[in-house]
Image: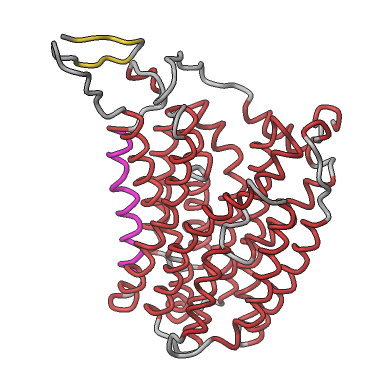
Amino acid sequence: MTQTTGTVTTDVAPGRPRRPRVHRAWIVAAVTFVTIIGGAAFNSLPGLLIDPLHTEFGWSRGEIGLAASIDMALYGLTAPFAAALMDRFGIRRVVVVALSAIAAGALASVWMTASWQLMLYWGLLVGLGTGSMAMSFSATVTNRWFTARRGLVTGVLTAAGASGQLVFLPLCAWIVDHHGWRPASVTVALAALAVVPLVWLLMRDHPADVGLAPYGGEPTDKPAPAKGAAARTVRVLFDAARTGPFWLLAGSFAICGASTNGLIRTHFVPSAHDHGMAITAAASLLAVIGVFDIIGTVFSGWLTDRYDARRLLAVYYALRGVSLLFLPMLMAPAVHPPMVLFIVFYGLDWVATVPPTLALCRERYGEDSAIVFGWVLASHQVGAALVAFLGGVARDVFGSYDVVWYASGALCAMATLMVLAVRRTGAGNRTDLTKAA
């Protein structure tokens, strides 16, 4: 016998209790997880290829860093509009195009002969592709397909990026070390392309497309394609930019990006290699950051529910700055306990800043907090882009990365003061962007 409840059909045998099938939402979530891992493969490459590209083509580290910075900047600037693109054209179409752009950029780089091609392939194509699959991808999937278990799903999908780093960093490092940088670039392209059929066959834009209700929720009609979401995104930016807390949060989060993606992810491996460490060993250390990244983010969320978000951020940035001041003394040809301790701490601190920063956005900007956070995230990537470029320039000029580590430590001290300057406010006193306009 078949019994229909709402839009969900369940097979029920006479005289037996119901055995609900696996909800389609979990399949969509699994596809999303694998897709984020496939898209994250490229993030493993830039730091590994600085030295090989410099050696083969004679390009300065500043030029190579500029390509990485374009990628990071476009990632950040595309991210606020990604949700609007998915509302307008659908999740499946946007993600397929994004994965294809990543694959095209990585594959085309195999035949490049000039640094401007690196900036076009790595910077423009990959930047637009990864930006279209930023945090808004997992947020959109979670909001549409889940009513219950949203926190769990969000945490798991957030961990997908770190999982991709854990998988691809050691693999790509081994390929670069044994076979050169071109096979590694092809590997990244194939990883992105391999996910495309999975997305096209199993991903759906909305539960209503397959006659289901969201997991744990009631049946809802699929909304019409949104027109004007991008305009609202821009309008919220201009309104928020007229308030002081926005600049404090955006500035501190830009320093967060500068001291993580722009600094450690891009320049740690070549810096360690300068001191005689094997590329595979340095990449493995960077991959370990991804493991502790997951732990640190979950624990930071738990702390954010219990303590002042401003003080948490101040502690995170202060400790990060101190650790960077000691890093030049830890560099050595072999891995030793103090370096492992640094890696563990940096992993715990890597995106621990996200939950309290999001909490402050929510506290200050209410219903517009998600969009405001999208722009704050964009500042994170712009900060990362600047340091990815300037770090390479500094290495060319000074012959080492020491000045980069010291300068980044000083920036973290500035971020500590900035977050403490954000005044606390209650729900009744949060910033009204309509009035601010």
398 to 253, vertically: above or below:
below
Q: Is residue 225 left or right of residue 228?
A: left
64 to 76, vertically: above or below:
below
| Image coordinates for residue 20, horizontal then vertical, percent | 25, 23
Depth check: 274 or 392 in front? 274
Whether residue 64 appears in this view of the structure is no
| Image coordinates for residue 148, horizontal then vertical, percent | 45, 29
Q: Residue at x 22, y 19 (%)?
A: 18
Whether residue 118 appears in this view of the structure is yes
295 within the magenta span: no
152 to 433, vertically: above or below:
below
Q: Is residue 197 left or right of residue 347?
A: left
| Image coordinates for residue 406, horizontal then vertical, percent | 69, 79
Q: Residue at x 27, y 32 (%)?
A: 201
Q: Quadrant of residue 184?
A: bottom left
Q: Residue at x 74, y 32 (%)?
A: 235
Tell me the quadrant of the picture where the C terminus can be found: top right
Marks counted in the figure total 0
| Image coordinates for residue 126, horizontal then vertical, percent | 47, 53
State the scheme by which the image is colored: secondary structure
Q: Is residue 51 left or right of residue 414?
A: left
Predominant secondary structure in magenta?
helix
Q: Residue at x 52, y 27 (%)?
A: 87
Depth check: 117 or 300 in front? 300
Q: Residue furthest left?
A: 14
Q: Is residue 65 left or right of residue 311?
A: left
197 within the magenta span: yes
Tell me the quadrant of the picture where the N terminus can be found: top left
Residue range corresponding to the magenta coloring: 182-200
Q: Quadrant of residue 170?
A: bottom left
